Image (spheres, rainbow, N blue to C red):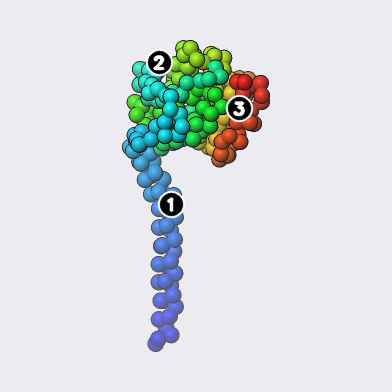
């Protein structure tokens, strides 16, 4: 009698195990992405608790830039000492504080740095878009830098982390006013953007998660703004 129930008990355990496995797969494929998407869309991390001064950049300005479609963007600007300037762009879910370390390295080498909250992030206006419509943001940032007396209009580049790297390369394919781009950790969609940017004669360096200043030396010397 007892032996008759053993196969049935094993089948129940097998069904339970399969149910658990299917549940975990569905959670991984559907529930987790949904939670992440909801968080990215509805959660904005404001700029808080740290400034460029905390990273050794005592001289900086709080700036507000208006885009062509009327969006107000917030940022910090560290003045240039070599007539070149870099637009520093954070990744998805972050804000300008994420590029403070990179900005400090660039500032030590004399570069001006515009640390920008892309629309939908930090203290900037707008909605989260994963950077797909950020060309207007970069156009406004370039216009701001070109109007500054400490910046040579022909010596402006961009540095981006993850999503910010994709935004920078996308902008380089859109405008001829960016002379070089460093994209650190850009995602899969960046491959076609790299081709478009390079076809526009922009020096583009796409790297993994290298720590500064190693990747900056990869740029051709003629495009390193001196």
- Separation of residues labelled 1 and 3 (CA atoms): 35 Å
Q: Nearer the viewer, mark 2 or mark 3?
A: 3
For image coordinates 41% across by 28% down, the residue present is 117
Viewer-nearest residue: 25 or 44 = 44
Residue 100, placed above or below residue 154: below
Which of disc 2 and disc 1 is earlier in sequence?
A: 1
Tag 2–tag 3 contact (CB < 8 Å):
no
Q: Which residue was labeled with disc 3?
A: 204
Q: Which residue was labeled with disc 1?
A: 28
Decide if residue 131 is in sight here.
Answer: no
Q: Which residue was labeled with disc 2?
A: 68
For image coordinates 60% across by 31% down, the residue present is 216
Query: Mark 1 falls on what kind of element?
Result: helix
Place of residue 122 in the rendered image (x, y in percent of width and height, measured from the top left) = 37, 31
The N terminus sits in image quarter = bottom left
- Separation of residues labelled 1 and 2 (CA atoms): 40 Å
Query: Mark 3 falls on what kind of element?
Result: strand
Residue 159, placed above or below residue 19: above
For image coordinates 46% across by 24% down, the residue present is 78
Q: Nearer the viewer, mark 1 or mark 3?
A: 3
Q: Residues within 10 Å of mark 3 (few under 14, many from 20)?
A: many
Viewer-nearest residue: 152 or 94 = 152
Decide if residue 182 is in sight here.
Answer: yes
For image coordinates 35% across by 17% down, the residue present is 70
The C terminus sits in image quarter = top right
Which of disc 3 and disc 2 is earlier in sequence?
A: 2
Viewer-nearest residue: 30 or 65 = 65
Tag 1–tag 2 contact (CB < 8 Å):
no
Place of residue 193 in the rendered image (x, y in percent of width and height, measured from the top left) = 56, 28
Farthest-out residue, right: 221
Rendering quarter of residue 204: top right
């Amino acid at each position: 009698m007892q032996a008759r129930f053993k196969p049935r008990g094993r089948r129940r355990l097998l069904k339970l195990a399969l149910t658990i496995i299917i549940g975990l797969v569905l959670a991984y494929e559907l529930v987790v992405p949904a939670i992440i998407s909801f968080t990215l869309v509805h959660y904005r991390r404001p700029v808080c608790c740290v400034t460029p001064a905390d990273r050794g950049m005592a001289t900086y300005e709080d700036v507000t830039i208006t885009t062509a479609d009327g969006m107000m963007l917030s940022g910090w600007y560290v003045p240039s000492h070599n007539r070149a300037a870099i637009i520093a762009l954070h990744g998805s879910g972050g804000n300008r504080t994420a590029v403070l370390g990179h900005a400090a390295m660039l500032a030590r080498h004399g570069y001006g740095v515009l640390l920008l909250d892309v629309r939908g992030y930090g203290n900037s206006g707008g909605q989260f878009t994963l950077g797909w419509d950020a060309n207007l943001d970069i156009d406004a940032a370039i216009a701001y830098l070109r109007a500054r007396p400490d910046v040579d209009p022909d010596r402006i580049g961009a540095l981006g982390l993850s999503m910010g790297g994709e935004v920078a390369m996308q902008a380089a394919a859109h405008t001829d006013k960016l002379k070089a781009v460093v994209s650190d950790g850009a995602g899969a969609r960046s491959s076609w953007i790299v081709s478009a940017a390079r076809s526009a004669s922009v020096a583009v360096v796409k790297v993994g998660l290298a720590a500064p200043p190693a990747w900056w030396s990869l740029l051709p010397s003629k495009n390193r703004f001196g």
